[in-house]
Amino acid sequence: MRKIYLLFTFLISLSIYAQESYYEGIDFTLPPDQLFRVLQNKLEDYNTSYTYGEVRDMMKIADEWEEDHSKVVLIYGYDDNDNNCTTDYTRDKNKFGGSNCEYNREHVFPRSLAVPGMGATNNNRTGIVADPHNLRPADQKMNQDRENFKFGPGSGNAGTRNSTTGTHWYPGDEWKGDVARMMMYMYVRYGEQCLPSLVGKGDTMDQNEMLELFLEWNAEDPVNYLEIQRNDYLEGVYGNRNPFIDNPHLATTLWGGMPAEDRWGILNVPLYEWEENFSIYPNPASDVIWVESTTTNEHTVYTLYNITGKKVWEDSAAASSSKKSIPVQDLASGIYILNIHDTQHSLNKKVIVK
């Protein structure tokens, strides 16, 4: 079952209205560490009486399938027609429970992986364990199979994967962006209790705690109608929103990495005047690529990605540096993407290593 990427006009309008009103007064040009704290303070404004029990009824609305309002969409699901209910993409709203072919509440950031843990669940419990931004309907067997494995790389449908670092869980091509944005929310909302490294495998970005894997998933898998539907509904009943659903490029602003979509069209505008500050040569190259700059920005970051989106090199330069060297002699021949960004601009250039 494929995601629907083309959003209806009324959904786009609702989303734009929501971001303008909810984020009113926030200065998105702040340095990343300051913006992180501002967003954290914003997310801490929520309905303190909201309970884990209420999530069961909330999901019937927030996770409603757009093609059949009697059903909810199941995270990690992908096929309603293979005669295997574990892999179902949707399920009748009323089939909630712990038995075969029923769905329950999946903590996408598992309770036990937080430090300290989130604690037990019951209908009177509020706080982190009941945060609906971290809870999705899931087939009970799929939920059981996921256990509390960390997220890790993969392709195709959801399931466990084995690697040199042990077993991990791949959420599926359908869901990896959703998961990444949920984990970003949990980190901003709860800080060190929900560090990305506690729930995912792989390298963290230089000098910050965000996983490269989540930044890649956020950029590769765009926001879908269900995320927008949930975000709009949860603001009404819970009181806050997931900023990375409203604009995935906020992750790029905070942590760098592979540039994600700017759904507002204001954070990632590669001005022609700024782009013209850079010249790249030689291209193709076999030894060193030079970037000559006339920009006066205080801090410019240069990141090189291979064709699969994996970061292979990164460095930065101060305003006083007019030239930047990018060593490519140890890279395989092929096409690479050079991203150049500062706090206000971002551009991508294709480079060829021969």
Image (cartoon, rainbow, N blue to C red):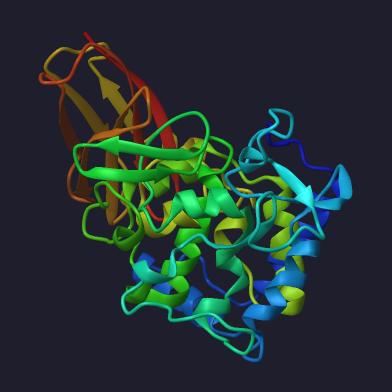
In the rendered view of the protein, which quadrant contains the N terminus?
A: top right
Task: Please report the residue visible at 53 percent of the width from the left and 84 percent of the height from the top.
Answer: 127
Of all residues, the one furthest to the front in this rendering is: 99
Residue 264: horizontal and vertical position, in percent? 64, 52
Task: Please report the residue visible at 27 percent of the width from the left and 54 percent of the height from the top.
Answer: 299
Left or right of 98 on screen, residue 313: left
In the displayed structure, would residue 176 be above or below residue 22? Answer: above
Task: Please report the residue visible at 33 percent of the width from the left and 57 percent of the height from the top.
Answer: 210
Decide which of 137, 190 is in the foreground and name it.
Answer: 137
In the displayed structure, would residue 162 be above or below residue 252? Answer: above
Left or right of 222 on screen, residue 116: left
Residue 219: horizontal and vertical position, in percent? 49, 41
Residue 274 visible, this orientation: no
In the displayed structure, would residue 331 be above or below residue 150? Answer: above
Residue 47 visible, this orientation: yes
Decide which of 64, 167 is in the foreground and name it.
Answer: 167
Badge count:
0
**Quarter of the figure with residue 33:** bottom left
Residue 194: horizontal and vertical position, in percent? 37, 70
Residue 327: horizontal and vertical position, in percent? 13, 27
Task: Please report the residue visible at 62 percent of the width from the left and 54 percent of the height from the top.
Answer: 138
In the rendered view of the protein, which quadrant contains the C terminus?
A: top left
